[in-house]
Image (spheres, rainbow, N blue to C red):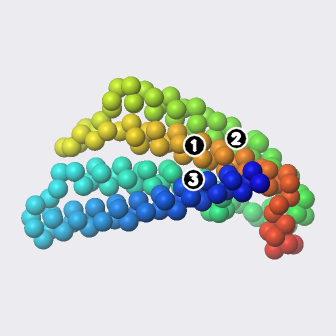
Amino acid sequence: MLTRVLDGVNEVVGRLVSVVAIVFAAIIIYDVFMRYAMNAPTRWAFDVSKQLYGFYFIMLGGYALRHKAHVRVDLITERLSPLAQRIVDLAGYLIFFFPFVWVFTSRSWDFAIKSWNQGETTYGAVQLPVYPLKMAMFVAAVLLLLQGVSEVLKILLNTHKDQDEVRA
């Protein structure tokens, strides 16, 4: 039940955030049109599209983990039994994933709060606020942490039976 809720949160966030790709692509197309067809480049499009792409990229970490889209090196583990694979996966989460996500979460929180308190903006032609993007880093870290908890619970509860049958 908890894994379904955690997976569901990242699924909804991933689907909502995927719309941002359309928005920043439209901004880029608009900017190119204005620059070359109308000879009137925008002052804001590059900075806005860069921030939207950063938001898009960072917010999809939990979604990617949910769908096993992160890079894995299975050269050794693919030859192991399903139980041994689960043990190696669990060890990987405990030794590498959770310490990384803890640092990512705590540092991005500090980073975001400092930016928020300063009212940080970009240095470009148009001064856009930076703190929403930095706050998104913290939210993304929390989503990644929650998805990691879901993945570990699945390993411990052995709910990856369908994947174990495919590997065997």
Residue at 47% x, 54% y: name it: 57
Q: Is residue 96 above or below residue 38?
A: above
Residue at the left extreme, as displayed:
39
Few, some or many C-alpha atoms within 10 Å of disc 2 (few <14, some 14-19, many ≥20)?
A: some
Q: Nearer the viewer, residue 62 or 12?
A: 12
Q: Which residue is mark 2?
A: 98
Tell which circle, 3 or 2, labels the residue nearer the N-terminal end: 3
Check disc 3 and report its element: helix, strand or loop: helix
Check disc 2 and report its element: helix, strand or loop: helix
Q: Is residue 128 above or below residue 167?
A: above
Q: Please state the horizontal and vertical placement of residue 63, each as a whole percent of the image.
A: 59, 57
* Residue 141 badge: 1
Q: Is 161 left, or right, of 44 in this rendering?
A: right
Tell which circle, 2 or 1, labels the residue nearer the N-terminal end: 2
Q: Which residue is mark 3?
A: 61
Tell which circle, 3 or 1, labels the residue nearer the N-terminal end: 3
Q: Amino acid at mark 2?
A: Phe
Q: Is residue 116 above or below residue 26?
A: above
* Quarter containing the N terminus: bottom right
In space, the residues marked 3 and 2 are separated at their CA atoms by 14 Å
Residue at 75% x, 41% y: name it: 95
- Residue 151 seen in this snapshot: no
Report the mark closest to the observer, 2 or 1.
1
Residue 34, image quadrant: bottom left
Q: Please state the horizontal and vertical placement of residue 14, each as a whole percent of the image.
A: 54, 59
Q: Amino acid at mark 1?
A: Ala
* Quarter containing the C terminus: bottom right
Few, some or many C-alpha atoms within 10 Å of disc 1 (few <14, some 14-19, many ≥20)?
A: many
Q: Is 8 left, or right, of 3 in this rendering?
A: left
